[in-house]
Amino acid sequence: MATAYDYIIIGAGSAGCVLANRLSEDPSVKVLLLEAGGRDWHPFVHMPAGLAKIAGLTSINWDYITEPQPQLGGRRLWCPRGKLLGGSSSINAMCYIRGVPADYDEWAARGATGWHWDNVLPCFRKAERNSRGADAFHGGDGPLSVSDLRYVNPLSHAFVEAGQQAGLAPNPDFNGARQQGVGLYQVTQKDGARCSTAVGYLDPVKSRPNLRVHTGAPVERITFDGRRASGVACSQGGRELRFTATREVLLCGGAINSPQTLMLSGIGPADALRRLGIDVRVDAPDVGGNLQDHLDVTTLQHCTQRVSYDRVSEVKTAVQYFLGGHRGPGTSNIAEGGAFWRSPLATDERADIQLHFIPAMIDDHGRNRLPGDGYTMHACFLRPRSRGRVELTGARASDKPRIDPNYLGDPEGFDLKVMLECAKLSLEVFAQKAFDPYRGDWIFPPQQPRGEADLIEFVRSRAETVYHPVGTCRMGSDDTAVVDPQLRVNGVEGLRVIDASVMPNLPGGNTNAPTIMIAERAAELILAAA
Ligand SMILES: Cc1cc2nc3c(=O)[nH]c(=O)nc-3n(C[C@H](O)[C@H](O)[C@H](O)COP(=O)(O)OP(=O)(O)OC[C@H]3O[C@@H](n4cnc5c(N)ncnc54)[C@H](O)[C@@H]3O)c2cc1C
């Protein structure tokens, strides 16, 4: 096995697979892609509705858990992250959402020079192959397939109708001229199967002789020659392997693991590193800081008709899917319906609340099956003010980091106020006429809340993550930013971070498409600098 490459990419997730594809386009450039997890062989990774079955599979999930959250009754929240080819894009819910232009203009205003909407729209379009074809907003021939759902549950149609009855405008394209409104999500699927970045970007090019993909190879730390990143040390089967990078090391481990790997490599808050016996290379206090996530409250009701996905036969669904040409409920991403809403607390023209409607009962992220039939509304605040942190607990990569998202921890209590709006909107949509034929008893909350105290109790006891941690290796132009606007790690050479961790703040929506956009743009920056 060769040990010297031009580029070494750490992590084959949403971002890493994009880079592996783009950088190995030139056959003279040698690229190594290292992934801690295994291959994406599991059939339920590829059958979209299989996401409910793989949610608890720890063999393909880092299976993190947060510190106790004081504002959430001291609960520890589950924090899943994909650990396989495709990373979290292989286990996510496939909703294709970019956020709005003002999100990226805000990034640029905060020091992410060159990342405003006009810069990033071409990268979103370059990535995308939308089944509706190309237009001013969408790409038609990129590696990432984006499609309409092949199968939609009747409850999701009722949700879209109910949203309109509650005053939301119908919206057939949340990534077009207008984000606000209610509709069905477009999904990252190709021919009814999941299109992770492993499927879209890696599979078509993995036979390139200049691209080596190495799974089961967790990187322990980045190695240096003076100030320059020279390669990586990774472990495999109890052995340490070393690889050298003649051009650059590209860290794509995601919002939890990238700051961990930087800190294990001596780049982070100096005192904390010294306490663990790690030699300090760069005192970078902000590594691991600025952690942001979309907190989400789920409202559940029983359904009086047997139409939800709760009791569909798994065997029949799988047979119809695998033998019937990817048809039927197996093609559902489960989170079929969506909405973007501007609450009375919105501070500008952007939507501040996103809904995901699920025609099934989702308790504990789908890991706890409830009896009967029901439906679930997820509602999250898109622009939280609370900031948390990722820290090391030990000096080895196998020591799980300490994750404290500090949910609802903003001093003004603004995040909690908007979460109450999230709960109110969910209840309002469920109260509409369109749900009359289906509405059964309350599940969560167990009864109609009687006032603000009930709503506060509901949010504190039920809120969970909707899986969008970002910001822990913040991009910016100031001295404390972890990476500069070219995503180069400040204080060293030959090292970039390219994944969701570099986002200065959360975009107004799901984070897979924005991460893929970041990697597309990073590939252009790297190739321009080579
Ligand atoms: C359950 C779930 C549902 C979601 N639903 C949606 C959705 O519907 N729509 C949406 O847009 N977004 C969704 N997201 C969020 C989205 O998928 C992520 O924001 C995005 O995938 C992050 O990409 P990334 O490249 O930063 O990290 P990841 O995709 O997580 O990739 C990181 C990769 O690096 C590997 N790695 C980490 N450390 C090391 C190491 N030391 N050595 C080697 N390899 C390493 C990991 O195993 C992983 O493969 C969801 C996420 C989850 C978990």
Image (cartoon, grey):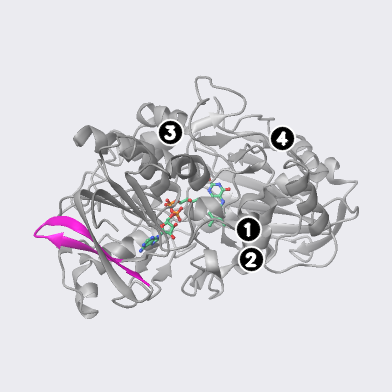
Amino acid on which the number 4 mark rests in the picture: Gly
Residue that badge 4 annotates = 167
Amino acid on which the number 2 mark rests in the picture: Arg
Residue at left offset 89%, top offset 54%:
306
Is there a contact, CB below 8 Å, between mark 1 and mark 2?
Answer: yes
- Local SS, label 1: strand
Amino acid on which the number 1 mark rests in the picture: Val
* Number of the front mark, 3 or 4: 3
- The residues tagged by marks 3 and 2 sit, at their Cα atoms, a distance apart of 31 Å
Mark 2 is surrounded, within 10 Å at the Cα level, by few (under 14), some (14 to 19) or many (20 or more) other residues, namely some
Is there a contact, CB below 8 Å, between mark 3 and mark 2?
Answer: no
- Pinpoint residue 93: horizontal percent, then vertical percent: 61, 50
Residue 286 visible to an observer of this rendering:
yes
Q: Earlier in the sequence, mark 4 or mark 1?
A: 4
Q: Is mark 2 within 8 Å of ligand 1?
A: no
Identify the disc placed on residue 102. 3
Q: Is mark 3 within 8 Å of ligand 1?
A: no
Is there a contact, CB below 8 Å, between mark 3 and mark 4?
Answer: no
Residue that badge 1 annotates = 297
- The residues tagged by marks 3 and 4 sit, at their Cα atoms, a distance apart of 24 Å
- Local SS, label 4: loop
- The residues tagged by marks 1 and 2 sit, at their Cα atoms, a distance apart of 6 Å
Mark 4 is surrounded, within 10 Å at the Cα level, by few (under 14), some (14 to 19) or many (20 or more) other residues, namely few
Foreground pick, 99 / 110: 99
- Pinpoint residue 170: horizontal percent, then vertical percent: 69, 30
Residue at left offset 63%, top offset 51%:
379
- The residues tagged by marks 4 and 2 sit, at their Cα atoms, a distance apart of 26 Å
